Amino acid sequence: MVSGTGTNMEVLLNAMADPDFGANPVMVLSNRPGIPALEKAANRGIRVVCIDHRHYLDNRLDFDAAIDAALRQARVSVVCLAGFMRILGFQFVSAWEGRILNIHPSLLPEFPGLDTHRRVIETGKTFSGCTVHAVTPELDAGPILGQAAVPVLPGDTPTCLAARVNRAEHRLYPAVLRRFLNKRRETPTRLTTP
Ligand code: GAR
């Protein structure tokens, strides 16, 4: 799921081209029409869906329900948020918990939320980074699955720090997703007795 440029989406799609990766991209879903990520995915022949959040401004539950329906219809088993910039509600996240990952451009638990790079620089940090975590109802607070650190250099602007973090994200996200998928395969299915 994407909201913008889609560079993380691209590296995940590239990684999935390896038959040993353990996943296939079934759909790229956006909350905004006309974004580069959608065009990139469509150019690769991947099904794209846009659920425009502006049509649901007074009803977030319906927005979440539309996303949920689209994911189920496409028989999605794992969701990767890759620069998806809308907050998903409790009901949606609870339904997908354990099957939904997010990448965040800071070393969580530090700097959750927006405007990360400016806050990192203003706080005088000498390093920053990115985190892939399991999504839980509390924003940017789910179990951490992997992190990569980068230095904050003297004179860094939020833009150049963002670019450095973004490059680290491109190494981290495919590696963490691969491990996540392997673990899922290793976990035996629990059969419930009726
Ligand atoms: C990435 O830096 C990602 O960590 C961030 O958006 C960027 C998307 O870049 N995500 C968040 O801030 C989520 N709260 P991309 O579209 O080039 O992958």
Image (cartoon, rainbow, N blue to C red):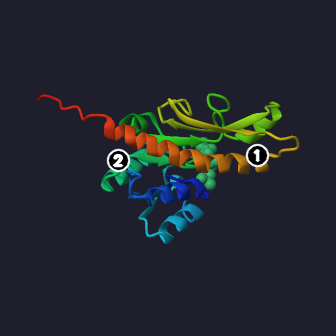
Q: Residue at x 78, y 50 (%)?
A: 160
Res 93 → quadrant: top left
Closer-to-camera residue (12/27): 12
Q: Position of residue 124 (x, y in %)?
A: 83, 31
Relative image position of residue 48 (x, y in whole percent): 44, 63
Q: Is residue 51 visible?
A: no
Lower sequence index among marks 1 and 2:
2
Q: x%, y% of residue 182?
A: 38, 42
Considering the numbered disc 1 on the image, is that residue within a helix, a strand or a loop? helix
In percent of the image, x 46 and y 58: which residue is there?
Answer: 28
How crowded is the residue under tag 2: few (<14 C-alpha within 10 Å), some, or many (20+)?
few
The disc labelled 1 sits on which kind of residue? Answer: Leu
**188 or 138: nearer the viewer:** 188
The percent coordinates of residue 126 (x first, y second) are 79, 33
Dots 1, 2 in contact, CB < 8 A: no
Query: Viewed as shown, does residue 135 lie left or right of 26?
Result: right
Q: Which residue is mark 2?
A: 77
The quarter in which the C terminus is drawn is: top left
Q: Secondary structure at mark 2?
A: loop
Report the side of 78 relative to 110 (left or right).
Answer: left
Of all residues, the one furthest to the left in this rendering is 194
Which amino acid is tagged 2? Answer: Ser
Camera-side residue of 102 and 165: 165
| Mark 1 → mark 2, Cα distance in angstroms | 33 Å
Q: Which residue is mark 1?
A: 161
